[in-house]
Amino acid sequence: MTRLSKKTALTTGAARGIGEAIARRFAVEGALVWVTDVDPAGQSVADAIGGRFLRLDVR
């Protein structure tokens, strides 16, 4: 069992850079990860880690 199993993580700005790295780490630790970004490229990150994607602009 991993540390974050049965937990949900919401990451913003996760299409690239630090946000992507954080989303990937949450997934490794067992969390269900919501990848959010204004860039639709976040979908490929979500697909790669078994997460879910939401196109979102945080202001």
Image: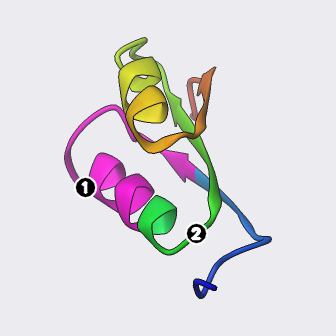
Q: Please give left or right for residue 14 compared with residue 6 in the image.
A: left
- The front one of 35 and 37 is 35
Residue 49 vs 21, above or below: the answer is: above
Q: List the residue tagged with mark 1.
A: 18
The residue that appears at 48% across and 33% down in the rendered structure is 46
Magenta residues span: 11-25
Q: Is residue 16 magenta?
A: yes
Q: How many marks?
A: 2
Position of residue 34 relative to residue 32, above or below, is above
Q: Secondary structure at mark 1?
A: helix
Three-letter code, disc 2: Gly
The quarter of the picture where residue 58 lies is top right
Query: Outermost residue toward the left?
Result: 17
- Return the disc, 2 or 1, that comes first in the chain's sequence: 1
Left/right of residue 1 with respect to residue 50 in the rendered view:
right
Mark 2 and mark 1: Cα distance apart in space: 19 Å
Q: Is 31 drawn above or below residue 36 in the view shown? A: below
In terms of secondary structure, what is the magenta stretch mainly? helix
**Label 1 Cα crowd, 10 Å radius (few <14 / some 14-19 / many 20+):** few
Disc 2: which residue: 30
Q: Say which of 58 and 20 sits in front.
A: 20
Q: Residue at x 53, y 51 (%)?
A: 11
Counting from the top left corner in percent of width and height, residue 44 is at 37, 21
- Residue 57, given in percent of the width and then of the height, sits at 56, 24
Where residue 22 sits in the image (x, y, percent)? 37, 61
Amino acid tagged 1: Ile
